[in-house]
Amino acid sequence: MKIGFLGAGTWGFCLASLLASKGYQVISWTRDKELAEVLTKTREHPHLKGIRAPDNMSFTTNMAEALNGIDLLVESVTSAGIRPVFEQVKKIKIPNCPIVLTSKGIEQNSGLILPKVLIEILGEGIKSKIAFLSGPSYAVEVIKGLPTSVVVAAYNPNVLKEVCDIFTTRTFRVYPNQDVEGVAYGGALKNIIAIACGIAEGLGLGYSTKAAIMTRGLHEIRKLAVAEGCRPETLSGLSGMGDVCLTCGSLISRNCRFGYLLAQGLTIEEAQHKIGMVVEGAYTCVSAIQLSKQLNVPMPITETVYKILYEGMPIKQAVQSLMDRTIKEEHL
């Protein structure tokens, strides 16, 4: 099997390496010429020192080369990059094979989850080929072979089974799920809650505060997802509660670390620069607020993060505004 991979960030490098380690021929595309040269020469990713790419994994900046004769296409760019990248794919050739999305986000202004962005670009006929991989997983742990469980969702049961089988290893356990929308919303929205948890940690507010943010944050995620027709139980699974626990619980998470740096006094630009990678929660926060208003779904934690990032609300004032909210009966 030949696998084309779009994106060579840490997560893309990790998953591509995982697939190559199973004996598949993997060709990874990146638009970053310098990165492609480094990966080809050293076989190591700049952010994953000491870990070499398998011999049957290659790198290119030529998208047509990455799409040629493939049996599976995997995406790992960014949520903002999905549309321009797949518009480029469309100009070359619409793939006649399963497409696995691994980025987590909601497109701004359109409010579309990433599988629906793909359908809008490539046409309704591509829907049966789309799969979506999500769940609690850090690239640095997965690539070291530490036990990890994730979830794959797809519209087509046959594609779902095929993708699960392709990605599953002895240390990377993949569960199937047919609720594509629920898996996508869980994976996207937890990044916003992670920013809030990072802020709490940066302010030294303690574990009780973080537990409250995670619990109430998951409640917000579930409310919005259900309003969009998703199964509520999906958000209790790996792409919901599982991903919230991981992303909110450690500064390994770039979203949590981003919030932490903001609380330490860095500006948004300084925090993003220090992290050196895309902070998906900052992008998706805009989309989440747009959707919450359209659907009339209150999301106080998400709204507070938005006010900090885009309206200049002081962080300590933002925290107090959450504590001053009228208390209502806990309803799940």
Image (tube, grey):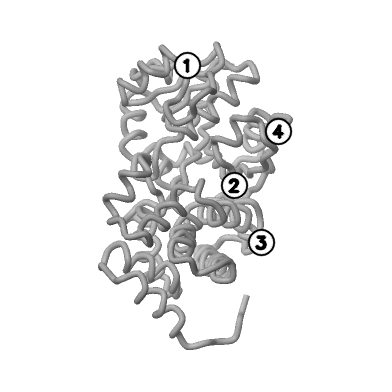
Q: Which residue is mark 3?
A: 233
Q: Which residue is mark 4?
A: 171
Task: Say which label, 2 or 3, has the lower sequence index.
Answer: 2
Helix, strand or loop for disc 1: loop
Q: Mark 4 and mark 1: span between their CA atoms?
A: 22 Å
Which numbered disc, 2 or 4, marks the residue that appears first in the sequence? 2
Q: Earlier in the sequence, mark 1 or mark 3?
A: 1
Give the alpha-carbon distance from disc 2 to disc 4, as whole Å. Answer: 14 Å
Left or right of residue 157, residue 266 in this image: left
Residue 65 versus residue 218 in the image, above or below:
above
Element marked by disc 2:
loop
Depth check, front residue: 232 or 31: 31
Label for residue 135?
Answer: 2
**Precedes in sequence: disc 4 or disc 1:** 1
Question: Disc 4 vs disc 3: which is toward the camera?
Answer: 4
Amino acid type for the residue under numbered disc 1: Arg
> Disc 1, disc 3: CB below 8 Å?
no
Name the side, left or right, on which 249 lies relative to 278.
Answer: right
Position of residue 110 measured from the top left corner of the image (x, y, whole percent): 33, 55
Compute the Cα span from label 1 to label 3: 41 Å
Q: Residue furthest right?
A: 170
Amino acid at pointer 3: Glu
x%, y% of residue 176? 67, 43
On residue 43, the disc is 1
- Where does the image place residue 272, in percent across and percent down from the top left? 33, 47
Q: Residue at x 34, y 19 (%)?
A: 61
**Mark 3 secondary-structure assignment:** helix
**What's the amino acid at mark 2?**
Gly
The answer to the question of whether label 4 and label 3 lie on touching residues, with beta carbons closer than 8 A, is no
